[in-house]
Image: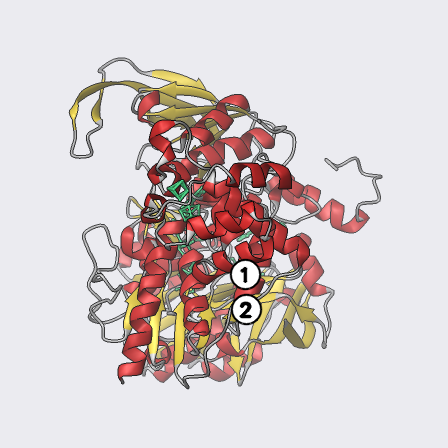
Amino acid sequence: MYLVEEATQLADRVFQMWITAPQVARHARAGQFLIIRLDETGERVPLTISAVRGDQVRIIFMAVGKTTEHLSSMKKGDAISDVVGPLGTPSEIERYGTVVVIGGGVGIASTPIIAREAKEAGNHVIGIIGARNKDFLILEDEMTEICDELFITTDDGSKGVHGFASTVLDELCKNQKLDCVWIVGPAIMMKVTSAVTRPYGVKTFVSLNPIMVDGTGMCGSCRVTVGGETKFACVDGPEFDAHQVDFDELMSRQRTYTDEEKASLEHYHHGGCGCCGGDH
Amino acid sequence: MSGSVKDFSEVNRGLSEENAVFEALRCMNCVRPTCMKGCPVCIDIPAFIQQIAERDFAGAAATLKKDNMLPAICGRVCPQESQCEGACILAKKEKPVAIGALERFVADWERKHGMTLPEIAPPSGKRVAVVGSGPAGLTAAAELARLGHTVTVFESLHEAGGVLTYGIPNFRLPKDIVRAEIEQVKALGVEIRLNHLVGRSVSTDELLSYDAVFLGTGAGLPYFMDIEGENLNGVYSANEFLTRVNLMHADCFPEFDTPVKRGCRVVVVGGGNVAMDAARVARRLGGEVTLVYRRRKEDLPARAVEVANAVAEGVQFVCCANPVRVIGEKTVEGVECVQMEMCDLDESGRPKPSCIEGSNFVIEADVFIEAIGQGPNPLLISMLPHLDRARRGNVVVDDDGMTTIDGVYAGGDVATGAATVIWAMGSAKKAAAAIDRHLRRE
Ligand SMILES: Cc1cc2nc3c(=O)[nH]c(=O)nc-3n(C[C@H](O)[C@H](O)[C@H](O)COP(=O)(O)OP(=O)(O)OC[C@H]3O[C@@H](n4cnc5c(N)ncnc54)[C@H](O)[C@@H]3O)c2cc1C
Ligand SMILES: Cc1cc2nc3c(=O)[nH]c(=O)nc-3n(C[C@H](O)[C@H](O)[C@H](O)COP(=O)(O)OP(=O)(O)OC[C@H]3O[C@@H](n4cnc5c(N)ncnc54)[C@H](O)[C@@H]3O)c2cc1C
Ligand code: SF4
Ligand code: SF4
Ligand code: FES
Ligand SMILES: [Mg+2]
C-alpha cells in the first residue's frame, strides 16, 4: 500500500498528489514515469513523475476517465494499492547549451523535473508552458524559479502570449540558436510543435503516451513507430526523437478503447446498479 | 473432458480419492524408477505413490514438498507425457502411471486439509536476492530459504507468479492454487517485494550488494512478426492479450477496469501452448477463433492434450499457412495469409515451411493475436556489466547455473529461452544448491 500524503486541485480537473513510494523516489530521474493501480479491480495507469522529495513522488494528472476520476477523489491518508517505478529511460540530459522545455496542458507536469536537471547540467533553460486559458495553467511559479526565461501561452490570450507554444518556439528558432528541445503534451500538440524545429535541425525530444499495461517491456501494448522501427515506449522511451515519430499511428492507437473507456466511466458513476445495461 | 467455453473454471477436474488410490496401485514401485529420470526436480515418485496407495496422503505431500514446493501447479501444467510419465516403465507396455494427476491429487488434498512446511536450516546470516517470482525465482527462493539463507524476491508486477499468474489461464491453472503455493514459499520466510523492477526500482549496485543473486526474469519479451499492419488497433501479442485477461481480469470488464477487445472473429498465429491458451481464452470471450500455423497439424509443438481441448472448444485450425499482412484502416479487418509447403527437414527434424507464391487468401478478423514466441526481457540483463549473453539474448550459465559474474546465478527461461515450468524449476534448484555452496565457501 502506498500512502497519499497530499492531494490538491491545481486547475479545472487537474490534480496534484504526493505519494510515499520510496523505491520510486530513490531512483527517479527526469523523463521517467510510474504506474499505479488503485485497488484490487483497478487498471494499471502510467503517470509522469513530476517531482521528488524524500520518500515521496509527485504526480499531476487530469481527470479524464474512470481511473483518473477515482484518483482525484482520493485524499490525504488514503492508500493506493500499487505503485511501480521509476519506469522508462531517463531524459538524455547533457550540457547542450541552450535548451527549451515545453509543456502543453497537463503535460506541464513533466517540465519542472526536466528543466531542473537540464539547468543543473549547465544549460541555459528556456521554458514554455501553454494551456487553453489562464485557469488551466499549472506550475507557473515553479517553472519561473527554475528557468532562465519562461514564456506563457494561452489559446485565448487570457494570459501571456495569445497562441500556442509552437508560436513562441518558432520565434525562438528564428532569433537564436537552440541546441535541444523537449516537448511534453497531448500527441497532437507534440506533433505540431515538433514540426517547428524540424527545418532548423534542432534535436527535439517528445514524451510519448501510448496505452500501457505492464510498463516493463513484456506486452507490446505501448509499441510506437520511430524511424520506421517498432519501439516499446515503456522501456525504449517514453522520450524519442520527435522528428522520427509516427504521431498519426500513436493517436490512432490511443483511441483503441474509446468505447470501453466510456463504459468504464459510466459503470464507475452508476456503480453496478444495473440501470445502465452494461455487459454484466 | 472438455469444459464449457462459457467460463474460466478449470477444465480438468482431477482424480477422486478412490481413483487416486486405484491409480497408485498400478505403480510397480520399481527398484530403478525410470520415471524419476524424467522429472527435472527429481521427486521421489515411487515413494509418494506408495504413500497414496497406503492412503497416507499427508506423508505423500511431505515427500513431494521435499523436492517441489509447487506440486499443485506442476501436477497441472507439466508436460508429463514427455517428462516423468514418458519415462515410466509402463509407458511402453500399456499406459504410464498418471504421475501428474497423482501429484495434483496429493497437493489438492493437502491444501484442503492444511499445509505443512518442510524443515528449515538454522540461519546462515547470508542474504540472497532473487529477481523474478516465476517458477524459477520461487523455486530458488524456497530452496535457499530452507537452507537457512535470508531471501528477498523482487517482482516488477503487482502479483507474484510470473507466467503462472499472467500467462497460463485460469481454466488450466486456477489462480487461487497459484496463490496458495506462493503463500507456502512465503511461509518459509521468503520476502516477496512486489512492484520492484530491478534495474529501475532497485539499482544494479544495490542488487550486487547481496551475498548472491539469482536471476529468474523469464522470457517475457514478445516477438512480433514484423509484417505490414501490425500496429493496427486490435493486434495483440499473446502476452498482452493473456495479461489483460489473466492478470488484469479484463474478462470481467467493467467490474474490473482493464478492457480487452473481445473480437467477433479472432485470428491467432502460432502453434505452441501459448497460442492454444490465447485461442481458448478468445473462445471464452465469445469470438469465432481461427488458429493459423505454418507447419502441418502433426507438427504442432503444443501439448497434444491442449490441441485436443482447443479443437473440442471450437477453435478452427488452418495449418500450412502463415500471415503476411494485417489488413485494415485503423483497426484490424482481416489477416492476409499465404499457404506454405513443407520442404526438407530442418535442424530440429521438422519440415521447413516455405511460401507458395500466389496462394494468398484473407481471413476476416477484428482481433489478431501473435503467439510466435518470446525472448528474455533485456532490461536488467543488459544493465549488468560482464554478463555474457548468447545470440538469442539469453544469459549464459554453466551447469550450476552460474553466470559470468561471480556470485550471480540464473535459471529458468532467462537462461534457457522459453521452456517449461518444470525445467525452470529444475534449473533453479540446481542453481540454489550451487549458491548454497558458494555462500558456505566464502
Ligand atoms: C508515459 C506516460 C505518462 C503519462 N503521464 C501523465 C501525467 O503525468 N498526467 C496525466 O494526466 N496523464 C498522463 N498520462 C496519460 C494517462 O495515463 C491517462 O490519462 C490515463 O491512463 C487515463 O485513465 P482513465 O481511466 O482516467 O481514462 P480513460 O477514459 O481510461 O482513458 C482516457 C485516455 O487516456 C489514455 N489511456 C487510457 N488507458 C491508458 C493506459 N493504460 N496507459 C496509457 N494511456 C491510457 C487513452 O488514450 C484514453 O483515450 C501518461 C501516459 C503515459 C503513457
Ligand atoms: C501462455 C503460456 C502458457 C504456458 N504453458 C505452459 C504449460 O502448460 N506447461 C509448462 O510447463 N510451461 C508452460 N509455459 C512456459 C512456462 O510458463 C515458462 O517456461 C516458465 O514460467 C518460466 O519460468 P521463469 O520463472 O523462468 O519465468 P517467468 O514465469 O516468466 O517469470 C519471470 C518473472 O520475473 C519478473 N521480472 C522480469 N524482469 C524483472 C525485473 N527486472 N525485476 C523484477 N522482476 C522481473 C516478471 O515480471 C515475471 O514475473 C507457458 C508459457 C506461457 C507464456
Ligand atoms: S514435477 Fe512434473 S515432471 Fe516432476 S513428477 Fe511432477 S509432473 Fe512429473
Ligand atoms: S517407472 Fe512407473 S511404475 Fe516404475 S516406479 Fe516410476 S511410476 Fe511406478
Ligand atoms: S506497456 Fe507492456 S511492453 Fe510497454
Ligand atoms: Mg481507464
* Residue A179: image location, x then y, percent: 28, 69
Q: Mark 2 Cα within 10 Å, few/some/many (few <14, many 20+)? A: some
* Residue B271: image location, x then y, percent: 37, 31
User: Residue at 46% across / 47% down in the picture?
Assistant: A221
Please identify the quadrant where the N terminus of chain B is shown.
Answer: top right
Quadrant assignment, res A170:
bottom left
Q: Is A39 displayed left or right of B305 in the figure?
A: right
Q: Nearer the viewer, residue B17 or B196?
A: B17
**Which mark is on residue B186?**
2
Q: Is residue B267 above or below residue A144?
A: above
Q: Nearer the viewer, residue B110 or B417?
A: B110
Amino acid at pointer 2: Lys
User: Can you identify the residue that label 1 sits on?
Assistant: B182
Q: Is residue B47 above or below residue A239?
A: above
Disc 2 on helix, strand or loop? Answer: helix
User: Residue at 60% across / 32% down in the picture?
Assistant: B285
Are the residues at dot 2 and dot 1 in contact (C-beta closer than 8 Å)? yes
Q: Is residue A179 visible?
A: no
Please identify the quadrant where the C terminus of chain B is shown.
Answer: bottom left
Q: Nearer the viewer, residue B119 or B12?
A: B119
User: Residue at 47% across / 71% down in the picture?
Assistant: A111
Q: Is B278 displayed left or right of A89 in the figure?
A: right
Question: Which chain's residue wears label 1?
Answer: B
Q: Is B82 displayed left or right of B3 in the figure?
A: left
Amino acid at pointer 1: Ile
Q: Is residue B225 above or below residue A2?
A: above
Question: Which chain's residue wears label 2?
Answer: B
Q: CA distance from mark 2 to mark 1?
A: 6 Å
Disc 1 on helix, strand or loop? Answer: helix
